[in-house]
Image (spheres, rainbow, N blue to C red):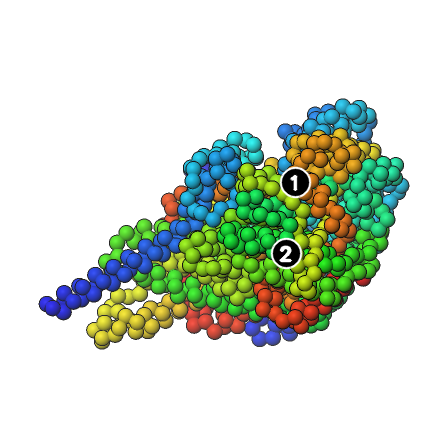
Amino acid sequence: MAKQSSMKRNRAIGNFFSYVVLVLISLIWLFPFVGVLLNSFRSYDPAVEYGGMVDYLIPKHFSLDNYKFILSGQTNYLKWYGNTVLIAICVAVLQTIIILCVSYALSRMRFKGRTFLMRFWLILGMFPGFLTMICLYFLLKQIGLTQAGAIPGLILVSVASSGMGYYVCKGYFDTIPKALDEAARIDGASRARVFLTMIIPMSKPIIIYTALVAFMAPWCDYIFASYIAFGHDSSYNVAVALYRWMNTGDYQGYFTRFCAGGVLVAIPVTVLFMLLQRYYVEGVTGGAVKG
Amino acid sequence: MKKKLVAVLMTAAMAVSLAACGNAGTTDNTTDNTTGTTDTQTTSEETPAVPAEEVSENAPSGEVVGDTTVKVWVADAVVDFTKEQITAFQADHPEFAGFDFLVEAVGEGDAAGNMITDVTAGADIYGFAQDQLARLVAAGALEEVAPENIDALSTQNDSGAVAAAKVGNTFYAYPMTSDNGYFLYYDKSVISDPSTLEGIVADCEAAGKSIYMDLTGWYQTAFFFGTGCTMTYDSDDSGNFTAANVDYDSDKGLVALKEMIELASSSAFQPGSSAGDAVNYAAIIDGTWDAATVKAFLGDNYACAKLPTFTGSDGNTYQMSGFGGFKLLGVKPQTDADKLAVCDALALYLTSEDVQLARYNAVGWGPSNLNAQNSDAVKSDEALSALGQQLAFTIPQGQYPGDYWTRAEALAGDVQASFQTASDDDLKAALATFQADLESYAK
Amino acid sequence: MAKEQSRKAKKNPIGEFFKDLGADIADIGTTFAKGGFRTRVSYLIMGFGQIFRGQVLRGFMYLFVEAAIICYLIFFGWDYLKKFTTLGTVETGKVGRVTVYGDNSFLILLFGILTIMAIVALIFMWRLNIRDNKKQDELLRAGKKLPGNKADWLSLFDSNFDKTLLALPVVGIFVFTVLPIVFMICVAFTNYDATHQAPSKLFTWVGFENFKNLFSFASTGFGGTFVQVLIWTIVWAFFATFIDYFLGIAVAMLINRKGVKFKKVWRTILVMTIAVPQFVSLLYVSKLFDSNGLINGTLLRLGWIKTAIPFWTNPILAKVMIIVINIWIGIPYLMLIATGLLMNIPEDLYESARIDGASPWQMFKSITLPYMFFVTGPFLLTQFTGNLNNFNVIYLLTGGAPKSGSMVGGAGKTDLLVTWLYKMTINDTNYKMAAVIGIMVFIVTAVISLVVYQMLPSVRDEEGFQ
């Protein structure tokens, strides 16, 4: 009896410390986001409050100036935002289709050169991507997909090389028993039929995971996208434009506007992510186990 | 079910028709599109897609063959201003009616970078800071100034700006501003005497405020040139550096370096030169482009002055020097004579006395044109007059290899880190390597 | 050809390759000798045999591919390919003040490679075409019927479904991944840099000149800097991977503890770092720790420190900071993964350990950790190689700073090979050295992966899982 109560007490103390640590961790983890959010409510108008960098956290006056500025059409922010949404949706859809196709072929079919293909792609993935940027730029320019055509160009490049990211999805397909395929095939279904009517409906989690990952990437692409847009303002995506606000001397005192822009970028991605978090966890865990 | 099958078949048909191209199909698209397509045509095809940004909608007439869009890259702040000026330019020059003008916001740094990456897709006319000139010439991104304009440009602009627009003896760009130098902004309520560096630092430390100064390549010359060091490069007409004249590896150089180290050791010191990123400062070494930001921050205590003097480790007093810099407008090499004529005329127009003055009034950029400089409005500008005073002590910035800026930034890194505890001998050795490296960039 | 060879690559890859190649050429010869006239004509006009044996669909596909590639070669590719050995000789000149562009070395190199790839593809298709003819010949000779066009077509959705599925992705990867990488490797053997910029200037082949420069340890040589950057890259990848790994498991176990409530809330908070784009969060964090940032400002105001802590200017401190901030990014992933995996460990293992009187630490050491290592081995490896090339964290936090005169090529003390490579490409347009560094990055990644992969306990035959 005494032992049990001491264990209980131990557990209570343990829980208490667990909570302390967890609260601390949460504070550290949330701090930057709170910082960005608070900064976004500081005005850039010197009449209200100084808008550059400051060494305090909570703004002296809360204002929506930054959001008004961003959404007012003084800049192309809405256009950039639209571009990013368009890229993200197209890439999410097309990339998912391609990855599903590749994964099914590699998981279910045994053909000549299959291992070669997988090894070859693995090796390709080890080359750093930046140097290929200039080459891709000139390739795209040759077919008119830079500057004004940068948006389709970006979609094309992200989709074209997406086949190499099949690991997680193939790993998932591998876990679906092959006996199911065999049974359907004995009943006379073709491979395509099996793929479309059996495997795909069974793969909802992995489809969502793949699409989610693909959807999130374009929001962060500030290097290649700026290379392809090549100074053509209206084909920037938000990341390029916002990054320019921080890094180009012409945009002094844009820090608070950068924060506001960042908040607006973070909202859809975060909301989507939170909604689909379950699938993301499933995908990431599955991917980690399969390697 | 049937519908489904049809849909599947359709997708499959698409996939197969693409598969038919097989591994080779990769090249098919390019074949159709590229044979006979020159780069100039690509640019002209793109323009219709962005009519919103065009300054004028003059339909290209049949008279002018080839590319009829003149693309202009300027900093975001002057995009609207430039558009207005181009409209005026078009009114003045009906003979160029066949040309469209497209103004895009590309900052000076990005413009140079983009031009170097791909000249053919870059702007026809673009603004840039003069330190990029040699790089741009070497990359073939600048056309020489039309011979008939050279005389006028040389006499109407200040001599520093003229020198800055030349590589060797060749005139490569149109001087646009003479304000690309730095001086001191300070807080009147904190700093009692802005004439000595020691005084400023002491005031800042006492008030718990910061003094911002960048120690990278462009700013560190304030110390080196101040103690009497020299560093120039000779270049030939095509932008190759032929010789370096550097004497940093000397007692003067050591005094300058030690002064930098001393400044960096102050608790008030912050590295940096952009007012928008600066926090809680009472003094900042910055240029006119940040005047508005500094004014907003310091409010009524806003004041400007030439750079201060400092007392070196040898007991002598030195006036801080530095670069006097300029912004230029460049025309890229053209494959069409008519278009070149338009570009020349527009570049000349955008850097003329009237436009420079108008630009000063619109966005506060200090003119390089002598008449514009002498106008009352410009003379009464606080920041520009401080810059004017400082100008007497600066060296007009010539041409420097890109490697210089990279290497000097590295020195700035050392000043704030390992040099803080280094002995005189170490510093001498470091200066010797620095000089050797700088000399190695000229071949 | 090459594909067949890779299967048997275990023993003596080169010997096997030539053996296969020999067999292949012999097979081409015997097919020609034995084949009928349809087969023989197919050697010149691809698909001829198939069309006249009734397999119109298949035949026209071969014919179309042949026609397309040959058209490409004649109208486009050849112009570039013939200059490939010199990368162009016609200099850009002037007529009056008008510029006349000469050869564009860049495009010659790029499209030269594309043309070579097209030729290889043509040879490959040609070989397939011959094999196809042979097969058909054999079938006919054995008195069997050839499948009709319809069956042929339907096979693309059944037995040949792999070809349908993979055609597009493979082509895409060849054009947009393989071609650029081959191009980059070629650039490492040229003098393409700031003073040799197409289209105004020509560049040309220089052999191993750039590699010599990389391993030159003279004052302006890249050797010393390369070694420094390489060492930091590996040190960084090691710490970034393993610290995150252990802390991630620890946090997951903490949240999974019996009695801790609101598990979902804690997880969601951590996961925010994955959802919010890094260029927003990391840029803010970088400003936070600036010498004039919020942290230093607050500490100074509170009087806890006299001078600002040089988070980003002191090389050692900057390196530590990067690793610490990376924990902030890394833990959430590991936490998610570990949470899923920890639940898979059979509870009775712990139960029996507890009865034996094992302490929590002992249980962690001898049950949890071995299990995690076993299951996540390959994942750890990919994490490690990913961290070797972790661009965002370094670039957004320090941009490689602080710089030092003891390093060349604009490298800073916290630069990884990739960020250094990026700077060389963008700031200095030193493409030739960037290409060399790129190849080095590949070699480092490949060697580490290969060595570690062989050592992993969980590496099993892939088929075994299914």
Identify the residue at the far left of this view: A1
Residue B383 tag number: 1
Residue C249 location, x and y as percent?
36, 63
Q: Nearer the viewer, residue C363 or A261?
A: A261
Give the letter of the chain under mark 1.
B
Quarter assignment of residue B345: top right
Q: Secondary structure at mark 1?
A: helix
Give the letter of the chain under mark 2.
B
Which residue is the site of mark 2?
Answer: B215
Residue C461 appears in view = yes
Amino acid type, callout 2: Leu
Q: Earlier in the sequence, mark 1 or mark 2?
A: 2
Residue A288 location, x and y as percent?
42, 60
Give the residue drawn at x 60%, y 48%. B193
Residue B102 appears in view = no
- Residue C430 lies left or right of residue A216; in this view the side is right
Q: Is the C terminus of chain C in the top left, top right, bottom left or bottom right quadrant? A: bottom left
Say how many tags the image has: 2
Give the residue drawn at x 63%, y 36%. B77
Amino acid type, callout 1: Ala
Q: Nearer the viewer, residue C72 or B441?
A: B441
Badge 1: residue crowd in 10 Å (few <14, some 14–19, many ≥20): many
Residue B225 location, x and y as percent?
73, 56
Q: Nearer the viewer, residue A21 or B216?
A: B216
Q: Secondary structure at mark 2?
A: loop
Q: Are marks 1 and 2 on the same chain?
A: yes
Give the residue drawn at x 63%, y 53%. B196
| Residue mark closest to the camera, 1 vs 2 | 1
Q: Is residue A16 above or below residue C10?
A: above
Give the residue drawn at x 14%, y 65%. A5
Badge 2: residue crowd in 10 Å (few <14, some 14–19, many ≥20): many
